[in-house]
């Protein structure tokens, strides 16, 4: 599918995978609506995207703030007419992260950002996607959605499993409206969230992991699929691990 002139909304666009996704979609000619919590980093991403000759709407938003999320999606539709691709990429984790040790506040925050944030934007954009007779929702979930682990933590694993379920439900509910949803499940990926681990990986270990640009390439691949085809899930893991 030709992407030039179409619009993508990307959450968590100020670092890691979000930056790489914004770059690759802008290079493909897509106008962008990007959001994250850190305004100064978001402005840098917007400037890089605009260098590709596309329009960019950038605004700091906490994805867990439903009112702010709805307002940003409305601003995006008002500016660009519609959103063709939503990329729910915003995510966080906690330290500590075991069920016994995670604080209730940290549990709530991880669920609110990872799962409720994805719901907020999908919920806001499905009606205008119906009106436009189609759209694509890409949820950046995790290997932890398929294989929960202590390394990922209970809240993170639960939130990403929820994102996977949300993706499946959207496809079950919206196929008649030509709305498609894909869950991308990265394994270990070299992003800033790794700094929250009890044992932070070394630079050598990070180099062997999946890189943000690998996930961005997967997003581009999914976005370019013709509307007749739907990719339900993609699992992407480092080659040096069995899974």
Image (spheres, rainbow, N blue to C red):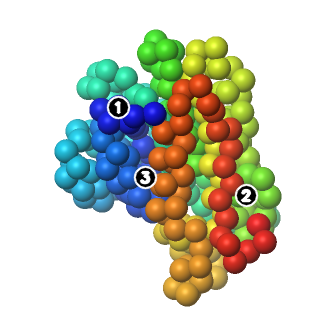
Examine the image and state in which quarter residue 62 appears: top left
Residue 32: give x, y in percent of width and height. 32, 40
Q: Return the residue at label 2.
A: 144
- Left/right of residue 105 with respect to residue 16 in the rendered view: right
Query: Which type of secondary structure does the marked residue at label 2 adopt?
Result: helix
- Residue 75 seen in the figure: no
Q: Residue sitting at 73 percent across and 70 percent down?
A: 151
Residue 142 bears which disc, if any? none
Q: Which of 93 and 215 is in front in this view?
A: 215
Q: Return the residue at label 3.
A: 21
Q: How crowded is mark 3: few (under 14 residues within 10 Å), some or many (20 or more)?
A: many
Q: Compared with residue 169, is residue 56 higher up or lower down, i.e. above or below?
A: below
- Residue 215 seen in the figure: yes
Q: Residue sitting at 68 percent across and 20 percent down?
A: 173
Q: Return the residue at label 1.
A: 6
- Ranked by sequence position, the earlier of labels 2 and 1 is 1
Quadrant containing the N terminus is: top left
- Ranked by sequence position, the earlier of labels 2 and 3 is 3
Q: Distance between the residues labelled 2 and 1?
A: 32 Å
Q: Distance between the residues labelled 3 and 1?
A: 15 Å
């Amino acid at each position: 599918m030709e992407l030039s002139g179409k619009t993508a909304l990307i959450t968590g666009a100020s670092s890691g995978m979000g930056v790489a996704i914004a770059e690759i979609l802008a290079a493909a000619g897509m106008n962008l609506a990007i959001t994250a919590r850190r305004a100064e980093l978001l402005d840098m991403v917007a400037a890089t995207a605009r260098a590709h000759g596309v329009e960019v709407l950038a605004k700091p938003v906490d994805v867990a703030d439903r009112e702010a999320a709805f307002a940003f999606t409305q601003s995006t539709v008002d500016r660009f007419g519609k959103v063709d691709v939503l990329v729910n990429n915003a995510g966080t984790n906690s330290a500590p992260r075991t069920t016994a040790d995670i604080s209730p506040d940290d549990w709530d925050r991880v669920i609110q950002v990872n799962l409720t944030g994805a719901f907020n934007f999908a919920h806001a954009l499905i009606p205008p996607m119906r009106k436009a007779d189609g759209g694509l929702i890409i949820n950046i979930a995790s290997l932890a959605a398929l294989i929960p682990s202590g390394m990922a933590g209970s809240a993170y694993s639960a939130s990403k499993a929820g994102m996977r379920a949300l993706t499946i439900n959207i496809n079950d509910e919206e196929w008649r409206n030509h709305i498609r949803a894909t869950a991308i499940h990265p394994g270990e990926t070299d992003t800033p969230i790794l700094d929250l681990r009890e044992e932070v990986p070394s630079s050598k270990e990070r180099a062997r992991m999946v890189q943000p640009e690998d996930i961005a390439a997967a997003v581009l691949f999914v976005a370019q699929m013709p509307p007749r085809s739907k990719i339900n899930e993609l699992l992407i893991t480092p080659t040096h691990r069995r899974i």
